[in-house]
DNA sequence: TAATATTGTCGCAGATTGAGACAATATTAA
DNA sequence: TTAATATTGTCTCAATCTGCGACAATATTA
């Protein structure tokens, strides 16, 4: 085994969604000295579950355990095989390629998306990168390889699932207002929703618990705070 | 490369759905001399798209090109790593393990489901198996490894997608009656649907073309035949 | 105390859905 | 020929769901 204990040909990439400033954002890594931007990703150890590998990487990048995580597609086209890209990254880090030639081989990447509470995250770069930072979906830099396609498909899957599960909850802190929840949904769906209809529908699901009011100091009626109550939509799946 | 030109650690499995006798069925392989039943699967060549590898396998098993095909999950737990199973299959075929040790290594399997017209298929076993045959979903034999879980997840995904795309069409011949279409939906969803409501809904989608009536010889009003007309629900995706 | 911005909720019209009913056949039996 | 039978295509009606505006109830500021 010359691949440092990792499975050859298999990688994962993660699209980590957060919500801040009324916008959906994702975590993007910037590699040293290359100008290359990429999704956080990694490899799977020989004796490790695929899902565990992804959670391990998420923990490293965000500091968080128990993240809402969903696998959505395995990208396996030949078009994504560009060994010169990985070679450039390695060279920019003064890495000798000795013992790392497996990284230049072809990879099939299993993609996941994660939903997290923006406030809880401490984005942390890895050894190969300068930064790990939030970028709004409409202000993404050019991403390497097929990572833009991966992001697009992640968002599409998230939208599709949004109607079935009440997944948007995972992007908010424990206590939140109805308006914040609606803003999350609008950011994901990319369209405005009618306030009354949204509230009626969400409340009819019976999975929100109402708490005391939240006095923001604004000159208006104070909204209730809500928290999320278990059931099929549990925060941790 | 000692793995015969295939990528190590990566496999695919396919859940191939057909509809016959008012039941949903899938293709199952039976390996020589082992009593083992399995989903049709295979490996990916070094210079081959993942999706193309699956289509290649589908062509070998069914004789068909241009099949409706959807990837739904990559199975990557350690629990599915049982080298003794593959070893038993190889031994039962008097295969020396020389040059095939890569098959005993750990695999992550990307699973797809396919929808085909039952009548068009000529199920064809491969070199390792006695048979490749249809089994109704409620009469499946015990499947090896995690293949039962894969089937369950395939059906779940198919059900979820059924409401969004009009995918059931792909399980029928070019011309079909409204009753046949309803039976397909009932088989997939596992529940009876109301006749009038179903017909109204499907027709309102405006993607069926009505043809001449079909005189079955039965003592009742002859139903119309329908065919499927393009749009987002195209037979070939 | 009045003005302003939001919030929680309600009401109404229009659309959608679930379920039964009825007329229109295609064939068989009388 | 005519009646009986099994299905099919369609319609109606009620119940439910949705989109959208309206109104009263606050927090805070002027």
Image: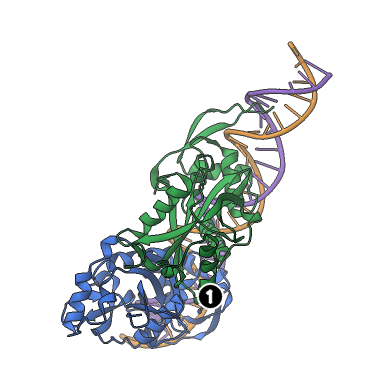
Chain colours: A blue, B green, C purple, D orange
Residue B74 position within the rendered picture, expressed as x and y whole percent measured from the top left: 45, 67
Which image quarter is the N terminus of chain B in?
bottom left
Q: Quadrant of residue A133 in the image? A: bottom left
Residue A28 position within the rendered picture, expressed as x and y whole percent measured from the top left: 28, 77
Residue shown at 46%/80% (left/top)?
A223
Q: Quadrant of residue B31 in the image? A: bottom right
Is residue B33 found left or right of D19 in the rendered image? right
Instruction: Report crowding for label 1: few under 14, some 14 to 19, many 20 or more residues within 10 A (C-alpha).
Output: few
Could one spot residue A201 in this view of the protein?
A: no
Could one spot residue A107 in this view of the protein?
A: yes
Residue C14 position within the rendered picture, expressed as x and y whole percent measured from the top left: 49, 49
Residue at label 1? B79
Camera-side residue of B195 and A43 = A43
- Name the chain under label 1: B
Residue C23 position within the rendered picture, expressed as x and y whole percent measured from the top left: 66, 27
Residue shown at 44%/69% (left/top)?
B108
Residue shown at 38%/56% (left/top)?
B53
Camera-side residue of A227 and A152 = A152
A82 in relation to B192, above or below:
below
């Amino acid at each position: 085994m010359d691949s440092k204990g990792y499975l050859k040909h298999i990688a994962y990439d993660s699209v980590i969604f957060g919500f801040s400033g009324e916008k959906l954002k994702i975590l993007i890594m910037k590699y040293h000295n290359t100008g290359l931007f990429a999704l956080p990703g990694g490899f799977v150890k020989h004796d490790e579950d695929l899902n565990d590998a992804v959670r391990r990487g998420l923990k490293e990048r965000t500091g968080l355990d128990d993240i809402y995580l969903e696998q959505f597609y395995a990208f396996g086209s030949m078009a994504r095989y560009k060994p010169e890209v990985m070679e450039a990254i390695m060279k920019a880090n003064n890495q000798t390629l000795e013992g790392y030639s497996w990284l230049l081989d072809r990879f099939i990447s299993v993609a996941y998306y994660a939903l997290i509470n923006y406030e809880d995250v401490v984005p942390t770069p890895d050894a190969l990168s300068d930064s790990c930072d939030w970028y709004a979906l409409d202000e993404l830099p050019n991403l390497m390889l097929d990572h833009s396609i991966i992001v697009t498909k992640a968002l599409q899957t998230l939208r599709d699932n949004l109607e079935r599960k009440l997944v948007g909850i995972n992007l908010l802190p424990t206590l939140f207002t109805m308006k914040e929840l609606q803003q999350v949904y609008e950011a994901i769906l990319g369209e405005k929703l009618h306030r009354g209809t949204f509230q009626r529908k969400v409340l009819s699901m019976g999975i929100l618990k109402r708490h005391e009011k939240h006095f923001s100091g604004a000159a208006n009626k104070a909204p209730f705070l809500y928290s999320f109550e278990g059931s099929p939509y549990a925060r941790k799946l």
